[in-house]
Amino acid sequence: MAKRKSGPRSSRTKAAGSAESLPSSGSAGEGQGGSSSSRPGKASSLLDTRVIYCGDCLEQLEKLPAGCIDLIYIDPPFNSNRNYEVFWGETKEKRAFEDRHESTQAYIDYMRPRCVQLARVLKKTGSFYYHCDWHASHYVKVMLDQIFGENSFQSEIIWRRTFAKGLAFTGFPNNHDTIFYYSGGGEITFNRPYIKYDPNNLDAKTAKKYSHRDADGRVYRLDNLINPNPNRPNLTYEFLGVRKVWRWTRERMQKAYDDGLVVQTKPGAVPQFKRFLDEQEGRPIDTVWEDIAPVNSQAQERLGYPTQKPLALLERIVKASSNPDDIVLDAFCGCGTALVAAQNLGRQWIGIDVSPTACRVMAKRLRDVCHMKESEPLWKAHRTDAFVVRDLPWTIAKLKAIPPFEFENWAVIALGGIPNKVQVGDMGIDGRIFPVGSKPSDHDSMFAGDWFPIQVKQAEKVGRPDIDAFEAAMIREDRQRGFFVAFSYSADADREATAFHKRTGRIIKLLTVQEILDEEWVQKI
C-alpha cells in the first residue's frame, strides 16, 4: 500500500503537545489544513473553471487535458438513468436492487469508462474519492484497483449516515456509506483534519491526561519544561528556586510565568507548563466518520434531493485533499454540494451532471448560498464570483426529447416555481409559483401561503380537454391565477381560457416553450 505523504504544498504543523514553543490560540471546530476562508480562488489559466456542464460526464471528461484536476469527488447513482427519474425524490430513493441496474455488471460497465477518464484527468499529486453504498461497493473497489492501481489506494472511509430504526427484519441494518480514497500515483496533498476536543465529553485517556481546570473552567494538563539535552549552558539557570536545564530562555520562561502559563504546584517543585486542551489541534480524524449527521428534514441546507450529502462532509474532503486555488471536479454533482464546499473554501471547481433539472438547482444554490452571479460577461471577465452553465437543452428539439418528469421540472423551475413533490396523482398541478413574500420557508409546506398553480404538458398542441382539467384544479384549490406550459395550443384551448376568465374572473396564462426560451414569458405574465 502506498505510504501516505504530505505534498510540498501541504500545511506542516508541529505535533500537538510539543513544548518547544508557546501554543497559539486554537481555532474552533474542525481544522488544520485547508483554508476556511470564503474568499474565492483566482481563475485557472489551465482550463475553464466555475462551470457546470449539463450532459454525460464521459463526453465532457474526454475534452479535458490529462493531469489537470487536483481533487475529484463523485457520488454516482446506482441507477445510471437517475436523470430520468423524478429529481425531488417522490419515491424516497428506492434502494431495492431490482429497481436499479439490471445487474451489478451493468453498473460496473457503466462506471468503468467514466472512471478511466477520471483517472486520466487527475494529477499525480491529486486525490480521488468515490462515494457509494452497500449495493456494489465491493465490486467498485476491484474496479478502482484495476484503474488507479492497488498501490494508489489510500483509505476506505466509513460514513455513518443514519442509525438503526424499527428493526422489523432479520439481520444488521445497512446504515453507512463507503468512500474509497485513491491517490493519483504521486506525492499527494493531505492536510490532516482534526476534531476539536469537547472538554465535557472526553475519552478516558484524554480525561486522565487533562485532569486540571482553571478558574475559568478551561481544561489543561501540566507539561514538562526540562530540556532533554543536559549540555545546554545557555539554558541552564535557576527559576523559582529550581536549577535545571530548561527548554526556554530565562526571558521566555519569565514571560510565560507572568502570563500564568507556568506554575509551581508547591515550593521546591519543578515548574510546569499549563497546556490548555482548547489550544490543541484535537483528535485526528480516522477512517470512521460518525460525527457528521445526514441531511434530515429539518436541516437548513436541505433541498429535497433524496441523496443530498451534508455540506460538512464535502468540506472535510475538500479541506483535507486540496489547497486554496486547487481545482475540484464533481462529475456526478447532483444538487452541487461539492461545488458549494469548493467555492466556500476558495477552490476552483467544475461540475458535471446529466440532469438539466439538477444543473438548474445547482445554479440556484450557488446564487443563493454562495452569492455568486450566473453571468457569461462577468465570467469571461474572470470575475471569481461568477459562473456559467453549459449545454443545457435550450432548444425545442432537445426539450421534446427529454423524459416527461424532466420536462416538467425544467418548465416549473424556468418560471421560478417549485416542482410538485408528487408526480403520480398530482391532481392536475405540476408546480407552484409563490409571489414575493409568500414563499414558505419549509418546502414541504407546499400549500402554505399564497401560490399560483402550474400545469405542464410535453405536448405539441394542447386542446380544450386539458384546459378544462386545469380549470377544475384551479377551482378546487381556489386559485385566481394559473399558468399552463406547452409547445403550442389549439384555437379551442385559447378560446376556453378566455371564456373561463369571463365566467369566473380567474386567469389562465397560456405559455409556450418558445416564449420561455425567448424569455418573453416575463412580460406576458
Image (spheres, helix red, strand yellow):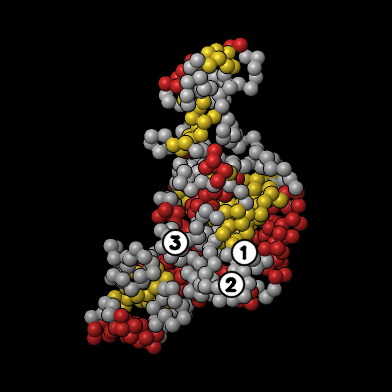
Dot 3 falls on a residue whose secondary structure is loop
The residue indicated by pointer 3 is 302
Q: What separation in Å lies between label 3 and label 2 (alpha carbons)?
A: 20 Å
Dot 2 falls on a residue whose secondary structure is loop
Q: Position of residue 332 (x, y in %)?
A: 58, 60
The residue indicated by pointer 1 is 133
Instruction: Look at the numbered discs 1 and 2 and tell me whether their residues touch, using CB distance below 8 Å.
Output: yes
Position of residue 130 in the picture relative to residue 473 (left or right): right
Residue drawn 52% across the image and 42% down it: 207
Query: In the rendered structure, which amino acid carries the disc numbered 3?
Result: Arg
Residue 352 visible to the viewer: no
Indicate which disc, 3 or 1, sits on the residue closer to the N terminus: 1
In this view, 413 is above or below 223: below
Query: In the rendered structure, which amino acid carries the disc numbered 1?
Result: Asp
The residue indicated by pointer 2 is 95
In this view, 148 is above or below 164: above
